[in-house]
Image (cartoon, grey):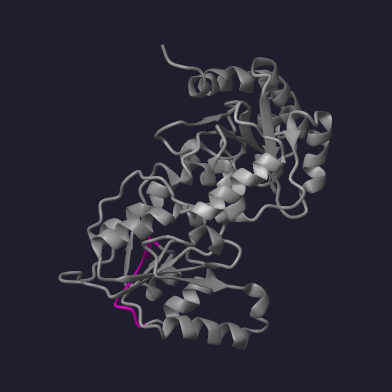
């Protein structure tokens, strides 16, 4: 840790920096609450990409969201002006969870007393006043661990999305239109991922759906998908239109969060929706390929399964065979999932 005097440090304006991805931004949300509790007098800002910003809305501990819209930054001079405008807001404390160039420019222009991050490479150390090694463990805990430089005890606490009542009501009405009834076992599937090393085959999801349906005939499964992913999920939907539900449009992040909050369980790949499920207190079950269990919230009804090959977790984006996913059979997944799902829906004796 680089030493910098924090005695009597009482920031009035704090900037948290986590530009992307959606799941990573969610995993940074516990820091908002912890910083608000430590420094109740401070106004807390969050600097993130525009696509991630909606999940931060309505957070009672957050004063303002600063959104980066890359489409608006048409040239380098426009970018520099944008970064300087952020820096001119006179932050006392900046917490950088990512060290990306578009954050480092803000750090460079800022006159904040404390610029905190995880231990950076030697060539970036000049930008920061304080750094500390991240601690291993659950991904959100790993992020929070750098706050111990501010005398904040890192904790294993879940990410949080603060839904509005009207958003939940809208989700309820949406499911009614889709003919999801109170006696249905309502689940969400997230069968897509831009990385093949994190995407369980769609044919496996079809078979898993049938295994669930055989055990619970009243099951309804809503298929989540993002932009340009509809073609991937359509074959799953067409395999059993009585079981699967295909939204007619890409759901917004907050629409997705509200719908997941109404599900009995969320099942899918290692992607943002699994973290949304944790953030809205919906049990989750994740099928792992290249990634590790460090992304699984270690408390409550949150589970994962992996084949357990020697090469796992590799954290790679490319693989010649993807045996860790292809050879993880739907029956194996169902055998692990069934008791956990039954525990949620069957009355206890």
Q: Is residue 118 magenta?
A: yes
Q: Where 208 falls versus 122 (above or below)? A: above
> Residue 57 in the image: x percent, y percent?
49, 62
Residue 321: quadrant of the picture: top right
Seen from the viewer's position, the closer of residues 5 and 69 is 69
Q: Which residue is farthest top?
A: 349
The answer to whether 90 appears left or right of 328 in the picture is left
Residue 274: quadrant of the picture: top right
* Residue 316 visible in the snapshot: no
Q: Residue at x 73, y 22 (%)?
A: 210
The answer to whether 189 appears left or right of 341 in the picture is right
Q: Residue at x 51, y 81 (%)?
A: 83
Q: Residue at x 70, y 16 (%)?
A: 214
* Residue 345 visible in the snapshot: yes
Residues rendered magenta in the picture: 111-119
> Residue 20 in the image: x percent, y percent?
55, 60
Q: Which residue is farthest left?
A: 8
Q: Residue at x 70, y 26 (%)?
A: 209
> Residue 53 in the image: x percent, y percent?
54, 64
State which quarter of the image contains the N terminus: bottom left
> Residue 27 in the image: x percent, y percent?
46, 51
Seen from the viewer's position, the closer of residues 94 and 180 is 180
State which quarter of the image contains the C terminus: top left
Q: Where 272 falls versus 333 (above or below)? A: below
């Amino acid at each position: 840790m680089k030493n910098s005097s924090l005695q009597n440090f009482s920031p009035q304006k704090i900037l948290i920096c986590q530009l992307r991805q959606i799941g990573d931004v969610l995993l940074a949300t516990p820091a908002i609450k912890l910083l608000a509790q430590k420094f109740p007098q401070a106004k807390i800002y969050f600097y993130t990409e525009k696509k991630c910003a909606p999940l931060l809305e309505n957070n009672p501990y957050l004063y303002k969201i600063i959104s980066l819209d890359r489409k608006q930054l048409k040239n380098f001079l426009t970018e520099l002006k944008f970064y300087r405008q952020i820096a001119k807001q006179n932050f006392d404390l900046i917490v950088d969870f990512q060290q990306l160039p578009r954050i480092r420019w803000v750090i460079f222009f800022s006159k904040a007393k404390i610029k905190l991050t995880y231990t950076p490479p030697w060539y970036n150390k000049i930008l920061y006043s304080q750094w500390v090694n991240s601690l291993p463990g659950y991904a959100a805990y790993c992020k929070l661990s750098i706050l111990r430089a501010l005398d904040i005890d890192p904790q294993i606490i879940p990410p949080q999305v603060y839904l509005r009542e009207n958003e939940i009501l809208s989700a309820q009405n949406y499911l009614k239109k889709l003919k999801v009834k109170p006696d249905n076992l309502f689940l969400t599937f997230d069968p897509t991922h831009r990385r093949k090393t994190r995407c369980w085959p769609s044919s496996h999801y079809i078979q898993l759906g049938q295994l669930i349906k055989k055990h619970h005939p009243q099951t309804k499964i809503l298929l989540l998908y993002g932009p340009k992913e509809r073609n991937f999920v359509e074959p799953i939907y067409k395999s059993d239109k009585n079981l699967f539900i295909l939204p007619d449009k890409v759901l917004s992040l907050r629409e997705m969060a509200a719908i997941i909050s109404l599900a009995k369980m969320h099942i899918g790949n290692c992607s943002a929706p699994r973290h949304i499920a944790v953030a809205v207190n919906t049990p989750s079950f994740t099928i792992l390929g290249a990634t590790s269990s460090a992304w699984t919230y270690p408390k409550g009804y949150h589970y994962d399964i992996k084949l357990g090959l020697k090469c796992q977790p590799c954290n790679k984006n490319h693989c010649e065979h993807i045996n860790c996913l292809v050879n993880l059979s739907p029956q194996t997944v169902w055998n692990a999932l069934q008791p956990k799902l039954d525990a949620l829906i069957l009355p206890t004796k």
